[in-house]
Image (cartoon, grey):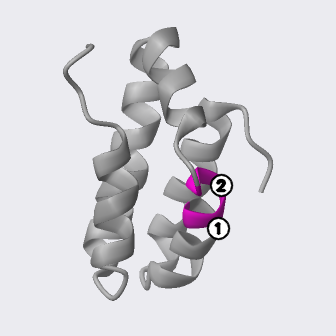
Amino acid sequence: VDGIDVELIVNIMQTYEDESAIQEQACLAIKGLAEASEGLKARLLEVEGMGEELKAAKDRITNERNKKYVGQAAAALGLEL
């Protein structure tokens, strides 16, 4: 758990903002990590720009059905978007 670079997720979301599938998978990764460990959840919440990236991901995800992943990630972190 300590070796997981949670900042990498946001960096990838920013680097590949035009890749809808990456945005989807990043949201699912955030959700999974936040639900797996309170320590990981706390580290995710400390990442600068986490909330903003999740908000941006909603517009970046092109498959309407998969836009729900943003809300699931936010809910796992206890964030309101």
**Tag shown at residue 55:** 1
Name the residue: 65% across, 54% down. 51
Q: Amino acid at mark 2?
A: Gly
In the picture of the structure, the residue carrying the numbered disc 2 is 51
Residue contact at pointers 1 and 2, CB within 8 angstroms = yes
Is 16 left, or right, of 75 in this rendering? Answer: left
C-alpha span from label 1 to label 2: 6 Å
For residue 25, above or below residue 40: below
Residue 69 is labelled as: none
Residue 80 horizontal side relative to residue 45, left or right: right
**Residue 43 place in picture, x, y as percent:** 49, 26
Closer to us: 61 or 18: 18
Q: How many neighbours does mark 1 have within 10 angstroms: few (below 14), some (14-19), or many (20 or more)?
A: some
Numbered disc 2: secondary structure: helix
Q: In the figure, 23 relative to 73: above or below?
A: below
Quarter where residue 19 is shown? bottom left
The x, y position of residue 68, in whole percent, is: 56, 59
- The x and y percentages for residue 74 are 63, 45
Residue 40 or residue 57, whichever sits in front: 40
Looking at the rendering, the stretch of residues picked out in magenta corresponds to 49-53
Residue 77 vertical position relative to residue 65 in the rendered view, above or below: above
Nearer to the camera, 37 or 8? 8
**Three-letter amino acid code at the position of disc 1:** Lys
- For the N terminus, the quadrant is top left
